[in-house]
Image: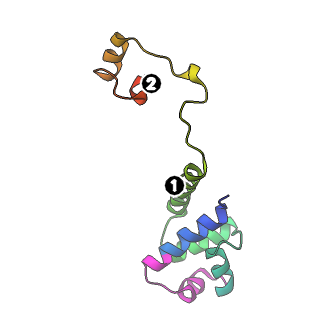
Amino acid sequence: MVLLRQLLGDVLRRLRLRQGRTLREVSASARVSLGYLSEVERGQKEASSELLQAICTALGTPLSQVFREVSDNFALAELQSEPVLEMPREPALLRELTQAELTQTSGGPARDITDMVPV
C-alpha cells in the first residue's frame, strides 16, 4: 500500500533537489525545524496544511502544483498495484455496436475494444 505522506515527501524532496537547495536552507526559509522537514520528506510525519504551505512558499512552488504531482504519482501507484482485468467488470456497460454505429461513432471500423465505446 502506498501512503500519501510518502508520496508527498517524495515530491517535496524532488522539488528541493531540483533547485539545488539543502534541507537547512529550506527549513530556515519555511521556519520549520530541519529534523521535522527531513521526516516529512522521508514520509515519516504527516504535515499539516499550514506546514505544507510554508514549505511550498519556501520552495517557491504553489501547493496546488505539489498536490497535482502527488495525485498523479498516487494514480500511477494505484494502477501498478491493481490487477489488470481482461474484461470489464460490468460487461453491460459496454454494448456491441452495429457496423453502422461504429462508422458513425469512430469514423471507421473498430480496431480494438476502446473503439467500441461511444463517446
Range of magenta residues: 16-33
The residue labelled by disc 1 is 72
Question: Which one is in front in this view, the residue at disc 1 or the one at disc 2?
Answer: 2
Q: Residue furthest front?
A: 86
Residue drawn at x 57%, y 23% as measured from the top left: 91
What secondary structure do most residues of the magenta stretch adopt?
Answer: helix
Asked if the magenta segment contains residue 80, the reply would be no
Q: Where does the image place residue 32, in percent across and percent down from the top left?
A: 65, 82
- Residue 13, picture quadrant: bottom right
Q: Residue furthest bottom?
A: 24
Helix, strand or loop for disc 2:
loop
Q: Is residue 1 left or right of residue 83?
A: right
Residue drawn at x 57%, y 89% as measured from the top left: 24
The residue labelled by disc 2 is 117
Q: Where does the image place residue 93, in percent across and percent down from the top left?
A: 56, 22
Residue drawn at x 43%, y 22% as measured from the top left: 118
Q: Is residue 33 left or right of residue 116?
A: right
Mark 1 and mark 2 residues within 8 Å of each other at the beta carbon: no
Q: Residue furthest left?
A: 108
- Residue 2, picture quadrant: bottom right
Q: Closer to the camera, 73 or 83? A: 83
Say what amino acid the circle numbered 2 marks: Val
- The correct choice, above or below, for 50 with respect to 82 in the image is below
Say what amino acid the circle numbered 1 marks: Asp
Q: How is the image coloured?
A: rainbow
Q: Where does the image place residue 114, in percent across and percent down from the top left?
A: 42, 30
Residue drawn at x 51%, y 22% as measured from the top left: 94
- Residue 112, picture quadrant: top left
Helix, strand or loop for disc 1:
helix
Q: Closer to the camera, 12 or 116? A: 116
Q: Closer to the camera, 85 or 75? A: 85
